[in-house]
Image (spheres, helix red, strand yellow):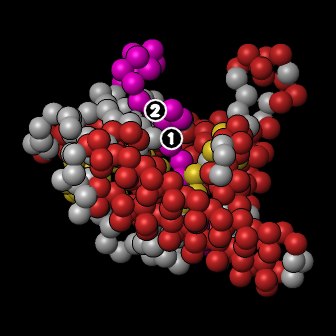
Amino acid sequence: MFATLPSFIRVPLALLALAINILLHVAFLFVFTVFKLVLPIRSIRQACSRVLVWIAESWIGVNNLLFEWFTRIRWQVEGLDGLRRDGSYLVFCNHQSWVDIPVLQKIFNRRIPFLRFFLKQELIWVPLLGPAWWALDFPFMKRYSRQTLLRHPELQGKDREATRRACEKFRHMPVSVMNFAEGTRFTQAKHAAQSSPFRYLLRPKAGGVAFVLDAMGEALHAILDVTIVYPNGSCTIMDLIAGRVREIRVHVLERPMEAGLIGSYDEDTAFRGRIKAWMNTLWSEKDVQVARMQRAADVPPMGD
């Protein structure tokens, strides 16, 4: 619709439309959040929570529409058949860019329960978005560096306790919990520093996945293993808005929940070894999947 406009017109229009979409939806989010906080009746609070999710899905839906209008992205998405809105999923994905988040939101919006991400505690202070994420029950995590833990050993395990508390509230409702198992976005420098055994991926961190599995227990009915590839190469949110992302490929594989995936990561050494081996096997398969998706791509270099 607007994708053929010159970039000096198209980009400001896209930014304005995205900003208006944020302001309108966040305003409605805050209204119903106030109702949820001040009214002590459980049924009303539950109704407000459903309305909040509906508003968030509308927000994502409008974002998706705007990206269709302002960009010319070629999408190739596999594996969405059979997904359920009434189920509960653990979703994990390779992590290359902040673009991964709108990609995941686009492909899963209204196909599975509303997708919630683990966020760093500091992000709660992001204007408008931070309070909106809090209102939508996104779990905020406070991570401690190795140096901090050495100076304050009493903080050991606090982040894991927070993971468990965050997941407990989702045990009795359909939910999709997102985890970027690599823990950070891929760069060649990080890849080299880790001596990663994978060609396209960083080493997965099994602990975060294990704690979600343990906290959610049998409430989860499946795992969604997502692989994203940007054939044009690494990209930013601004590249997405400016229309410089030409193609996005996504592969979704639904994996069954297995009893052997639930256990005490901290206390059971044998279980810790099993979950690490399981994650490494999945990541080896994902590395092959990325290579396959890269070979299948035939697109021009990124550019406007």
Position of residue 127 in the picture relative to residue 9 (left or right): right
Position of residue 1 in the picture relative to residue 165 (left or right): left
Residue under the point 36% across and 20% down: 188
Read off the magenta span.
174-197
Q: How many neighbours does mark 1 have within 10 angstroms: few (below 14), some (14-19), or many (20 or more)?
A: many
* Spot occupied by residue 71 in the image (x, y as percentages of width and height): 26, 53
Observer able to see residue 216: no
Contact, mark 1 vs mark 2 (Cβ under 8 Å): no
Label disc, if present, on residue 185 of the rendered structure: 2
Seen from the viewer's position, the closer of residues 29 and 158 is 29
Determine the residue located farthest toward the front in the rendered image: 9
Residue under the point 9% across and 42% down: 298
Give the number of marks: 2
Seen from the viewer's position, the closer of residues 200 and 258 is 200
Position of residue 303 in the picture relative to residue 177 (left or right): left
Observer able to see residue 298: yes
| Picture quadrant where residue 267 is located | top right
User: Where does label 1 land, which residue?
Assistant: 181
| Picture quadrant where residue 174 is located | bottom right
Seen from the viewer's position, the closer of residues 71 and 247 is 71
Residue under the point 43% across and 66% down: 62
Seen from the viewer's position, the closer of residues 153 and 17 is 17
Secondary element under disc 2, as helix, strand or loop, is loop
Residue under the point 58% across and 59% down: 23
Secondary element under disc 1, as helix, strand or loop, is loop
* Spot occupied by residue 39 in the image (x, y as percentages of width and height): 87, 77
Q: Amino acid at mark 2?
A: Arg
Is 183 inside the magenta-drawn segment? yes
Distance Cα–Cα, label 1 vs label 2: 10 Å
Q: Is residue 55 above or below residue 42?
A: above
Determine the residue located farthest toward the bottom in the rendered image: 43
* Spot occupied by residue 133 in the image (x, y as percentages of width and height): 65, 55
